[in-house]
Image (tube, helix red, strand yellow):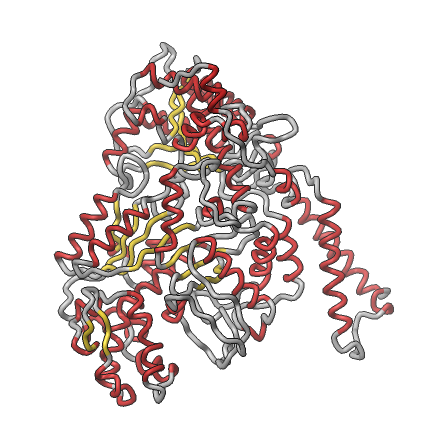
Amino acid sequence: MITETLLDRDLALSKPTRKDDINKTGAWFLGSKGENADWFSKMILEAIQANTEVRNSYFPEDPHFITQEIKESEEYQNSLTTLEEEYHKLLKELKKSAPFFSMRSAGHMLWDINIPSILGYFSALLYNQNNVAAETSPVTTLLEMQVGNDLCEMLGYKTTPIHAPNQDFQPTESGIVGWGHITCDGTVANIEGLWMARNLKFYAIALQNAIRNEKILKPLSTLEIKTLRGENKRLLEVNIWESLNLPIDEVLALPSIITENHPEITIEELEKATSKYSIQTLGFFNFYQQYLSGVSQAPVAITPNTQHYSWPKAAALLGLGQQNLRIVPNGKTTRMDIDRLDAILADCVENQIPVISAVAIIGTTQEGAVDDLEKVLQLREKYRKKGLEFTIHGDAAWGGYFPSMIRSKDGSNDFSYLPISDYVVRQYQMLAHTDSITIDPHKAGYVPYPAGGLCYRNSAMRNLVAFTAPVVFHGGLDPTVGVYGVEGSKPGAAAASVYLSHRVIETNQDGYGKILSECTFAAKKFYAELACMDLEDNPFVCIPLIELPAAKEGKSKNEIIDELLFLKSRIIDVPNQEIIADKPAMELLKNMGQDQTIVTYMFNFKNADGTLNTDPKKMSDLNNELYNRLSFHPWQDDIEKTPLIVTASEFDPNNYCKKFMTYLYSRAGLSKVEDVPLNFIISTFMNPWIAATNQGELLKTYIQVLKDTVVDIINEKYR
């Protein structure tokens, strides 16, 4: 039970609070009511003026077409009239867009985009640079390279400063530095990450066969490599299974080792000779038939069942096949079941099934869960000793900016004031040990679409997915990012957008960390509000996906009620700085609710006699109707009447493990588990001001809207 004397509480509150500097975030956004519109308009006008100055200063003696005479012509004036008419029609239509900028937007993984990112995008858009090639993007290519470093550093990868072609490269102590770039979205980043891992898995075999068959590579017949067991062996003497499981960094270092020790072989000649034998050139069928006849089973990639749909898409596009994704079920929570991952890896070792990559999700997009990356990394070490090697990919498309919460300018490691558990902190720290990470600036980075991202721990990984076409890349010393990855043409404006955002809103505790910390406080308080509905006499019950800590620990009903009362008095409606100073309250807040700012919950209704509905379909229909009333649809004309924005998904018994579904059914008061998906509601908190408006916390409004809407549905459909 949580009981304290007033003296105990005074002592708990005596800890100094961290400076509350939330006011500075007000300069970073246009504002839910456009409060910064005048200043923002001035900045936009400056971008147009700067672009116009460039147009006039570039060979000013050149002629121009649009003279005053043309402007006064009938044709010109008619064209302007048409433009204005159609533009005003568009502006009118756009007013029907979902108001994601609003304080009432708490559903999807987007909120308002920040001012620096808009200014960066708009100003660069006027120059229309294409980051597929440096010659078409001499400025924004360099900006993208800097953004790649920013993202790598935020995630824990080592980097080296961006340097000009004639400057010396300064390697890290290990010689390994990270590299990142912008993609259009997280799906493309995930595809690229798996593409890299696939090519890496088979590179050594391709090189072995190139050495055997290409005259120019004959000097490499004595080339040695270190195996997983730490033995130095000639590459040509390494058997097929060992070749498929050589240490990642040893394989990636091979091109550099070869060209350094054999200057007569250029990197271009090595790539050309090896590519003839690569899986990229031959395809899976020919590659397996020619070189892997002794490997009886197809390679696999391992993903959690909470995976984004981009993973089966990636498997299909890369020729792995969706059936060769080994799916790790969740456990009692929605985090990956580490014991089941262990069993899958054991099976792969026993049956000599090549493992390309294992994916851990750092912020699932439906449940807000952070997988136990630390244990995934420990399992890899365990299976390396058994001769199995594979990359580990962190899918942090949603959660990648949250590690900014643990990055300080002064290197301090004081996380006591952060509203996240020690478990979550540890997983963010472990990101530095992954091989690749997907991160989307256009999600928790608050920048415009399209701006996904992919980072590699070892920059050499990018070479495995490089297609260097002479039309877009002229070789030599041109800095470029466009030859790596899936995309061709892509907007330099996206790079400028993320770049300026990072320069103004830093990727540490004083910038993004501040925003996301405030959002996490709001999400935790909202969770507390949902949980405390149990203390009220409502015609429904609310079932947050994550149980209260007291319930998870198996405590008594009275102890659970005590915890709810503690939430009401010490967390709900209490300013964040007071919670931080209140040690027991802060400890409870850290360890309750979801891992990040996505809150998942469901409602079930009470029958007229006060008993709880036991029909899963009726409960699912209730939540689906709630979603329909608090969301938007095409051709909807009454958007301004929607009092709150949420989103929804479903727990399908075919996708989630039986243990999880059985427990969820039990908590909701439903009958035995049926083959009926349970619809649930998602609220995502990306607004750092919810708990600090000029009228107090807005969470009460959210809760009241939910209550009123649920009651209306119950009265209309179940009474």
Horizontal and vertical percent for residue 131? 54, 68
Total marks placed? 0
219 or 683, which is in the foreground?
219
Vertical arrangement, residue 428 with respect to residue 482, above or below: above
219 or 482, which is in the foreground?
219
Q: Residue furthest top?
A: 609
- Judged left or right of residue 391, residue 632 is right
- Judged left or right of residue 273, residue 704 is right
Q: Is residue 487 visible?
A: yes
- Judged left or right of residue 26, residue 195 is left
- Judged left or right of residue 582, residue 555 is left
Residue depicted at 29% across the width and 20% down the height: 555
Horizontal and vertical percent for residue 515? 55, 42
Q: Is residue 402 visible?
A: no
653 or 244, which is in the foreground?
244
State which quadrant residue 164 falls in. Answer: bottom right
Horizontal and vertical percent for residue 531? 42, 23
Vertical arrangement, residue 497 with respect to residue 237, above or below: above
